[in-house]
Image: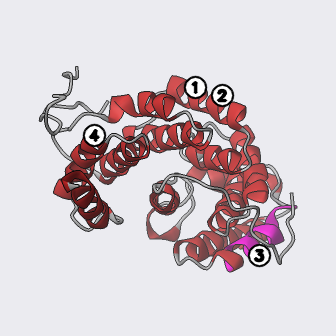
Amino acid sequence: MRKPQNESGPPEQERWEDLGPIDEIGRPDEVFDSVDADDALRSAASDAVRRSRTIADRGELDPATAARIAETTSSSARATRMRERLIDGFGALERERFGDARRIGNSIVKELSDVAAVHELIGLANYRMGNWRSAAASLDRARSLSDDVTLWPVLMDCLRAMGRRGEVAELWNELKAASPPHDITAEGRIVAASTLADAGDLKGAVAVMAPAARLPTRVRDHHLRQWYVLADLHDRAGDRSGAIKWFEAVAAGDPAFADVADRLRTLGRARRR
């Protein structure tokens, strides 16, 4: 389905067929060293909220979540109130009011402890606030209640932040086996490769990213994020030509992506020495 990349120049064009309660005042967990794709991954988490099955058009819950809330509450009036609170929480998350989103989630999680969407809300809010352990606990609970793999890469990144590399690799293998949409796979691949890079295994990280070394007919944001990681890994490994090739591929898709222009200028100066 995919052609080998041209090693002497930019990627060649090809056709690609897309087949529990938490303290209200928290302090970000230990900051960890990582590749420069982390900011892009944080943006991907925001995208995950928007594409989640939890919130439908016009601010309504998806039917499965609404039905689960009805099953676990004492009355129809209470179920309506809980649905409204959950919608408010995801609205706050989308507006990047992470503390508000977490407070709303914490206020309903005891009553809706078996509703995956509530744990997703708390987990994503904590993730965006840098509270890795709390985020991982909530996202893992959501994972146990739902077969939706949308947020697995976010859980992987929390595990990575805590240095739990074996669990990252295990979840990455499970994600691949689930055959999710390409954008979800791309986010998981970024985390898996970044985890290896954190441990100094740049060769292994590049190998994990190898499937991303293709140019699809239509370039999407998740392609740019993967190419940026590839470029960064080549740069860190001392392969300036490889880094330049992939940074140029990113710049061709979006000249304003992250700091790609600065990276290319720096590499260009280094290459001329």
| CA distance separating discs 3 and 1 | 33 Å
Task: Tell us which disc is closer to us: 4 or 2.
Answer: 4
Most common SS among magenta residues: helix
Quadrant housing residue 86: bottom right
Specify few, some or many for label 1: CA neighbours under 10 Å numbering under 14, 14-19, or 20 or more: some
Residue to which mark 2 is pinned = 170
The CA span between labels 3 and 4 is 46 Å
Name the residue beneath numbered marker 1: 173
Of mark 1 and mark 4, the one earlier in the sequence is 1
Q: How crowded is mark 4: few (under 14 residues within 10 Å), some or many (20 or more)?
A: many
Q: Which of marks 3 and 4 is in front?
A: 4
Name the residue nearer the viewer: 6 or 147.
6
Disc 4 target residue: 242
Instruction: Check whether the beta carbons of the residues at disc 2 and disc 1 lie within 8 A of each other.
Output: yes
- Give the side of residue 58 with respect to residue 168, left or right: left
Tag 3's secondary structure?
Answer: helix
Q: How far apart are marks 2 and 1 (CA)?
A: 5 Å
Distance of mark 1 from mark 4, alpha carbons?
27 Å
Q: Distance between the residues labelled 4 and 2?
A: 29 Å
Identity, as a three-letter code, of the amino acid under mark 2: Glu
Residue placed under numbered mark 3 in the picture = 103
Residue at 21% x, 22% y is 4
Identify residue type, mark 1: Asn
Q: Identify the secondary structure beneath mark 1.
A: helix
Assess disc 2: are there few (<14), some (14-19) or many (≥20) residues with their C-alpha within 10 Å of its C-alpha.
Answer: few
Q: Residue 165, relative to residue 101: is it above or below? A: above
Residue at x 74%, y 65% (from the top left corner):
79
